[in-house]
Image: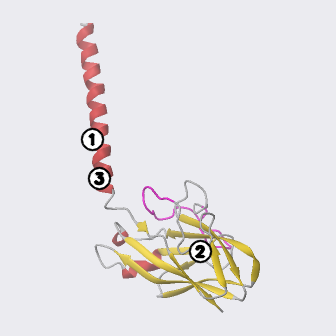
Amino acid sequence: MEGKSTGAIMATIFFTIVCAIVGSCFMAFVYEHKKVIIVNPKIILDSGISVRTESQSNANSLVLSKALLGLKPATGKEDAVTHIPFTITDTIGTEGQYAKFFVTSASDYNVYVKNINVEAQEDATGERKHICVGIKNEKETTKTLEEDKVLLYSGTPTEKPKELTFFVWLHAHAGQKLIGSKISFDLSFEVA
């Protein structure tokens, strides 16, 4: 009698493991087509402005942090000063993506987000208002990508590189039209 019980238990455990493996493989395949992907933004520079990252001395693009499950709508409450949700950070486990970079400029400058493109299965133009960008610890830099050219940040001349952390995330009200989309844009550093 014990042999039958042990056999039934082993068969149940084996069946459960096989179902878990097949299910996770299936979900990985299906989910890959539903991820919201942000393309690493290209950097466009006016003369007299330079941007570097920790890995590039003259950066031509920002390398955003990895989001293995794609970008998800933010669930945290917004900071009263920066309007960046508390769940958007520059650490592992953030609900958005981030990139750190250093700016040096001989004159006042503005950073714009432009050449915004959302490739989706449906027309997601109306959803651009739910794609958010911001600069860490800077007031009034949180913006949506609703317009074609968005002023993100204004800086003053600096010989010593100024460290900035760029954030991108989806607003909590982001709609279904963004599912499976690919979002791209450029960061343009222009003399003011």
Circle 1 Cα neighbour tier, 10 Å, few/some/many (<14 / 14–19 / ≥20): few
Is residue 78 visible to us here?
no
Q: Position of residue 71 (x, y in %)?
A: 45, 63
Badge 3 is on which residue? 29
**Does the magenta stretch mainly form a helix, a strand or a loop?**
loop
Instruction: Report whether 55 appears left or right of 148.
Output: right
Q: Residue at x 54, y 75 (%)?
A: 60
Asked whether disc 1 touches disc 3, contact meaning CB atoms under 8 Å apart, the reply is no
Look at the numbered disc 2 and give the secondary structure of its residue: strand
In 3D space, how far apart are the residues under numbered discs 1 and 3 (Cα atoms)?
Answer: 11 Å
Which quadrant of the structure image shows residue 37? bottom left
Q: Nearer the viewer, residue 185 or 123?
A: 185
Q: Taking the image as drawn, is residue 89 in sight?
A: yes
Q: How many numbered marks does the figure carry? A: 3
Q: CA distance from mark 2 to mark 1?
A: 40 Å
Residue range corresponding to the magenta coloring: 66-86
Q: Residue at x 73, y 86 (%)?
A: 106
Q: Secondary structure at mark 1?
A: helix
Residue to which mark 1 is pinned:
22
Query: In the image, is residue 14 part of the stretch drawn in magenta?
Result: no
Horizontal side of 188 relative to 184 (left or right) equals right
Residue 146 position in % (x across, y down): 47, 83
Is tag 3's residue or tag 2's residue first in the polypeptide sequence?
3
> In the visual, does 156 lie left or right of 140?
right
